[in-house]
Amino acid sequence: MSFFLSKKSLLQSRIEKRLEEYDHPSKSFFFLIAIATSLASLGLALDNTAVVIGAMVVAPIITPVFGFSLAIIIIKISNAFKSLSSIFLGSITAVIVSAITGYIIKFIEGQNLILTNEIVIRAKPDLFYFLVAILSGLAGAYAYSKPKILSSITGIAISVALLPPLSVIGLSITMQNWHLMEQSIFLYILNLTGIFLGSIISFLVLGLGNVD
């Protein structure tokens, strides 16, 4: 029994160390979010799915969510608040950058942004997106616990559930489309909650939080 407990202890310690760097987000964290958001916003405005997906390669916004989930499980309130702060600051950065990108596009085009299909589908919250977010949280948290798994690939799939709605929030400010903004905010919250629940389940299944 002590052998299994020590393995769980080692696993928990390893994951904590991997996530701790996002408790105090660096300049690189914000830089990558800014670049990813700019790309995602351009992809949404151009109605180009490939560009939107490509933007996810450099988006690190999901990692603090895992840090928050783990902190809740192991009851480290200070870490939970730090992770929550990183999520909030990262999200605000994404919204601001997407709004600026929207205004730049508007200036170049000389007209208001067009409501593309890519924008519309990122502002239609429903239970299917919630299920996708839960499964993404399960996969992502599991990947972070297994060094041999290419977690970056999993991160790309997960970030799709968060970054595009944030980009739409910023673009909706540019378009002054407040209904669109409300819908994209709701979708973002829905996806964030789903990823949080999925990662909680994954960490619990791995036996974290029960280590003495």
Image (spheres, rainbow, N blue to C red):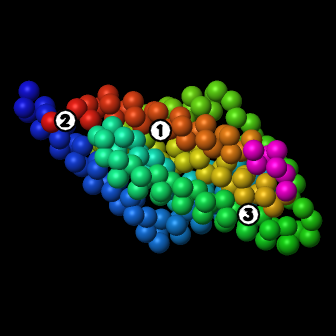
The residue pinned by badge 2 equals 211
Tell me the amino acid under the disc marked 2. Answer: Val
Q: Residue at x 31, y 54 (%)?
A: 18
Given residues 72 and 57, the one toward you in this image is: 72
**Vertical placement of 197 versus 174: above or below?**
above
Q: Residue at x 85, y 56 (%)?
A: 176
Relative image position of residue 72 (x, y in whole percent): 36, 40
Q: Residue at x 53, y 34 (%)?
A: 194
Q: CA distance from mark 3 to mark 2?
A: 45 Å
In the rendered image, residue 47 lying in the magenta stretch gets the answer no
In this rendering, would 206 be left or right of 113? left
Q: Are marks 1 and 2 in contact (CB under 8 Å)?
A: no
Question: SS of the residue at dot 3?
Answer: helix
Q: CA distance from mark 1 to mark 2?
A: 21 Å
Give the residue at the far left of this rendering. 2
Relative image position of residue 21 (x, y in whole percent): 35, 61
The tag earlier along the polypeptide, 1 or 2, is 1
The tag earlier along the polypeptide, 3 or 2, is 3
Tell me the amino acid under the disc marked 3. Answer: Ala
**Vertical placement of 107 versus 148: above or below?**
below
Query: Is residue 13 visible in the rendered structure shown here?
Result: yes
Q: Which residues are magenta?
A: 176-182
Relative image position of residue 143 (x, y in whole percent): 37, 42
Q: CA distance from mark 1 to mark 3?
A: 26 Å
In this rendering, would 187 be left or right of 87? right
Quick one: label 1, few (<14), some, or many (20+) residues within 10 Å?
many
Tell me the amino acid under the disc marked 1. Answer: Phe
The residue pinned by badge 3 equals 99
Residue 196: numbered disc = 1
In the rendered image, residue 180 lying in the magenta stretch gets the answer yes
